[in-house]
């Protein structure tokens, strides 16, 4: 039983009986348990419409709610909150429900198999994954896991920018480093790539071919460089527990003629014009702040042009919605892309762009800008090696992507309760240790000895899991999962410290083992939704 939904139904039926206007019912869990198990502000929202005192409306709603086996008591709290105290026996039912559903507990079908494409990471194959990429990659993968768990039909996609000027610059950069190895003068391009990995690729090509390619064009070198760098990205992502359903190449989009097709459609709609030898999009007519260049006077496409073609390709594959996870530097790019697709006849509301804010790396209070291992910018690979994959995934899952994040390496490595990952993981490991020492756990048909406030607080929190997962999916906020897990772990640690779990009475012991077992199941299910493995010992 989903208690929160049952309570929502009771309130909605009461409002209908009173012939009040139907509206969204918001239920909150009071931080102070003296205020009950759930609270709603519906009376205050209704008061604005009815032009009445919210306390008066709250009392009317309270009087009209019929007696049932869910609600034990209702309090009215100024300025108009309706607080519900629920029958405690209801909470006990969740134990066997979790035991039965196990890894499926928390799963729902709110997505109704809607097809959603989630494109994330999509780092240009010109270097390694840095911390901003890592945060966006973790967020995108968490979103895929959560939405899939809630019944959406998800396709995860990586868009490979393997064509255009940046790839030409990459090829030229590798070629010049290669020339240097051949004892020739290096003439690095103005917009060249100076990373250590470019030098490594040049040396690999030199070791394999000596000076064979010094006098030919750089097509081979360019393709070799893209392949090596893309493989490095794939390796890091797989190590980070991220696998994509689809890898789409910009080069393939161009080869299919999708760019010419989209430009032709835009010209037919009379929303392009030529000026100073370039082709412009009438973006101001579409709600943008200024018109945008589609094709430069030298014939090169701007970044916008292949992106329009790529999104047309995704829509043509039949998705109900497209979700893009982009870095903070792409914020101003959203409007022009949406406007272009709207002009081409696609609903821009079906494109949800999520912007991931920057990451600042700290060690205690000191900011880290360079990798100790390589002397270069800190990468995802560095971070996984430094603090571990699980701690890295957990920390990236903790914060709302709309805010800048401070990632404290020292804290993530620590084995103390101040480390949120350790605190949650230790709750799971502690339960595993207890259960290993138990020969047999029998199924209980009734739970008669679980009656402490510490146990009921855990049970109430377990009841929340499904609704938290659904809210996380609907709001596209994976950090709601980590918030929940931390609160559940805290309630378990409090329970463990205040109540004896290993008791001599067989019935009491068996009921307690079932109780902590379901806490373990929910922690495991929650951690899996953010790509974190559940530790059995710490």
Image: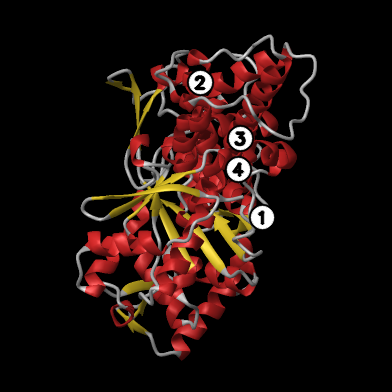
- Closer to us: mark 2 or mark 4? 2
Residue displayed at 32% across by 64% down: 60
Residue 96 position within the rendered picture, expressed as x and y whole percent measured from the top left: 70, 37
Q: Which type of secondary structure does the marked residue at label 2 adopt?
A: helix
Residue displayed at 40% across by 62% down: 25
Upstream in sequence: badge 3 or badge 4: 4
Q: Which mark is residue 447?
A: none
Q: Residue 298 is drawn in which quadrant?
A: bottom left
Residue 481 versus residue 443 in the image, above or below: below
Whole-Å distance between the Cαs marked 3 and 4? 36 Å
Question: Which residue in the protein does label 3 denote?
Answer: 522
Q: Are marks 1 and 4 in contact (CB under 8 Å)?
A: no
Question: Which residue in the protein does label 4 denote?
Answer: 230
Front position in the image: 245 or 58: 58
Q: Which type of secondary structure does the marked residue at label 4 adopt?
A: helix
Counting other residues with Cα less than 10 Å from the Cα at mark 2, is it few (<14), some (14-19), or many (20 or more)? many
Counting other residues with Cα less than 10 Å from the Cα at mark 1, is it few (<14), some (14-19), or many (20 or more)? few
Residue 14 in sight here:
yes
Q: Which type of secondary structure does the marked residue at label 1 adopt?
A: strand
Whether residue 488 sits left or right of residue 337 in the image: it is right
- Closer to us: mark 1 or mark 4? 1
Front position in the image: 143 or 489: 489
Q: Residue 246 carries which label?
A: 1
């Amino acid at each position: 039983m989903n208690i929160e939904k049952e309570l929502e139904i009771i309130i909605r039926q009461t409002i209908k009986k009173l012939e009040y206007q139907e509206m969204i019912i918001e239920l909150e869990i009071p931080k102070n348990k003296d205020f009950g198990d759930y609270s709603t502000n519906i009376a205050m929202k209704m008061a604005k419409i009815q032009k009445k005192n919210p306390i008066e409306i709250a009392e009317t709603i309270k009087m009209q709610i019929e007696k049932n086996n869910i609600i034990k008591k209702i309090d009215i709290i100024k300025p108009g909150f309706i607080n519900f105290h629920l029958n405690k026996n209801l909470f006990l039912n969740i134990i066997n429900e979790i035991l039965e559903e196990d890894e499926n507990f928390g799963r729902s079908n709110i997505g109704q198999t809607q097809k959603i494409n989630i494109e994330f990471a999509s780092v240009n194959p010109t270097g390694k994954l840095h911390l901003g990429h890592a945060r966006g990659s973790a967020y995108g993968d968490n979103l895929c896991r959560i939405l899939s768990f809630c019944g959406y039909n998800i396709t995860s996609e990586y868009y490979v920018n393997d064509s255009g000027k940046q790839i030409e610059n990459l090829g030229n950069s590798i070629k010049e480093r290669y020339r240097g190895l051949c004892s020739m003068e290096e003439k690095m391009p103005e917009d060249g790539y100076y990373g250590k990995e470019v030098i490594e690729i040049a040396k690999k090509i030199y070791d394999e071919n000596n000076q064979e390619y010094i006098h030919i064009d750089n097509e081979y070198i360019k393709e070799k460089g893209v392949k090596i760098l893309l493989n490095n990205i794939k390796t890091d992502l797989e190590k980070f527990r991220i696998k994509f359903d689809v890898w789409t190449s910009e080069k393939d989009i161009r080869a299919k003629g999708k760019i010419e097709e989209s430009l032709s459609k835009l010209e037919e709609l009379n929303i392009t014009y030529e000026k100073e030898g370039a082709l412009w999009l009438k973006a101001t007519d579409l709600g943008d702040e200024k018109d945008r260049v589609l094709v430069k006077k030298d014939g090169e496409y701007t970044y916008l042009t292949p992106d329009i073609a790529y999104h047309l390709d995704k829509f043509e594959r039949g998705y109900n919605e497209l979700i893009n996870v982009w870095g903070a530097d792409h914020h101003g790019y959203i409007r022009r892309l949406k406007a272009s697709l709207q002009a081409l006849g696609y609903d821009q509301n079906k494109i949800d762009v999520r912007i991931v804010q920057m990451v600042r790396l700290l060690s205690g209070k000191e900011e880290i800008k360079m990798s100790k291992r390589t002397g270069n910018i800190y990468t995802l690979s560095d971070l996984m090696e430094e603090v571990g994959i699980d701690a890295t995934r957990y920390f990236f899952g903790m914060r709302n992507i709309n805010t800048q994040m401070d990632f404290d390496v020292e804290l993530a490595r620590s084995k103390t309760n101040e480390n949120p990952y350790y605190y949650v993981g230790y709750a799971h490991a502690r339960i595993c240790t207890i259960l290993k020492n138990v020969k047999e756990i029998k199924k209980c048909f009734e739970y008669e000895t679980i009656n402490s406030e510490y146990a009921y607080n855990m049970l109430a929190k377990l009841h929340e899991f499904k609704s938290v997962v659904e809210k996380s999916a609907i709001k596209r906020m994976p950090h709601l999962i980590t918030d929940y897990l931390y609160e559940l772990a805290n309630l378990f640690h409090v329970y463990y410290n205040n109540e004896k779990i290993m008791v001599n009475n067989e019935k009491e012991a068996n009921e307690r083992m079932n109780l902590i077992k379901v806490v373990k199941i929910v922690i495991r299910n929650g951690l899996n939704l953010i790509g974190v493995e559940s530790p059995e010992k710490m």
